[in-house]
Image (cartoon, grey):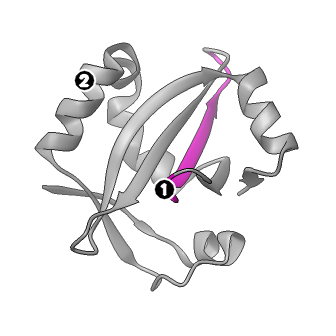
Amino acid sequence: MNKVGEISQRIIDILKLTIEAGTPIFIGESNISHMIQSHPRDYQVYGQQIPIIIERPDYVGVNPSDSSLEYVKVFTTENESVKVAVRVSQGGVFYARTIYARDIEKMTRFIDKGYLLKY
C-alpha cells in the first residue's frame, strides 16, 4: 500500500465534506490490479499521473451512485479528461480505486449537470 495523495482543505470546502484535511489516500495492489484489468490503456498511459491528478485536479465531484470522490484532470494533448475515483473502505481508509479516460465532451456534460465542480 502506497500513499498517492491526501484530501486537501480546498477539496473539503468545494465538496462540503466532513473529512479531516490531510486524510491520506492510498493505492494498494488490488486497486492497481483492478485498474489494469478494467482500464488497461488508461492505466498504462495515466497511471503514473495519479498523484498529480489528486494533488492538482481541474475538476472534482462526488459520484452520486457510490459517493466516491472524483478527481478529474484534463489532458488537452490527448483531448481526454482522466478521472481517478477515490473510495473509502469499510475500515475508513481512502483508496484510489480506479482510473479511466473520457473524451472532454462527456466531462463537459457532467460539469453542466453539476456533478463536477471547478477546482
Q: Residue at x 84, y 45 (%)?
A: 113
Give the Cα separation between the discs numbered 1 and 2.
Answer: 19 Å
Q: Is label 1 or label 2 in front?
A: 1
User: Which image quarter is the N terminus in?
Assistant: bottom left
N-terminal label among 1 and 2? 2
Q: Residue at x 25, y 23 (%)?
A: 36
Name which quarter of the figure residue 5 lies in.
Answer: bottom left
Q: Is residue 102 above or below residue 26?
A: above
Q: Is residue 53 magenta?
A: no
Q: Are marks 1 and 2 in contact (CB under 8 Å)?
A: no
Q: Is residue 97 above or below residue 34?
A: below
Mark 1 crowdedness (10 Å alpha carbons): few <14, some 14-19, many ≥20: some
**Left or right, residue 40 beside residue 18:** left
Q: Position of residue 77 (x, y in %)?
A: 63, 16
Q: Position of residue 28 (x, y in %)?
A: 16, 49
Check disc 2 and give the amino acid type.
Answer: Ile
Nearer to the camera, 52 or 111: 111
Nearer to the camera, 74 or 41: 41
Check disc 1 and give the amino acid type.
Answer: Ser
User: Which image quarter is the C terminus in?
Assistant: bottom right
Residue, disc 1: 68
Mark 2 crowdedness (10 Å alpha carbons): few <14, some 14-19, many ≥20: some
Q: Position of residue 84 (x, y in %)?
A: 46, 43
Q: Position of residue 19 (x, y in %)?
A: 48, 82
Residue, disc 2: 36
Q: Is residue 72 above or below residue 66?
A: above
- The image shows a total of numbered marks equal to 2
For the residue labelled by badge 1, is the local secondary structure a helix, a strand or a loop? Answer: loop
Residue range of the region highlighted in magenta in the rendering: 66-77
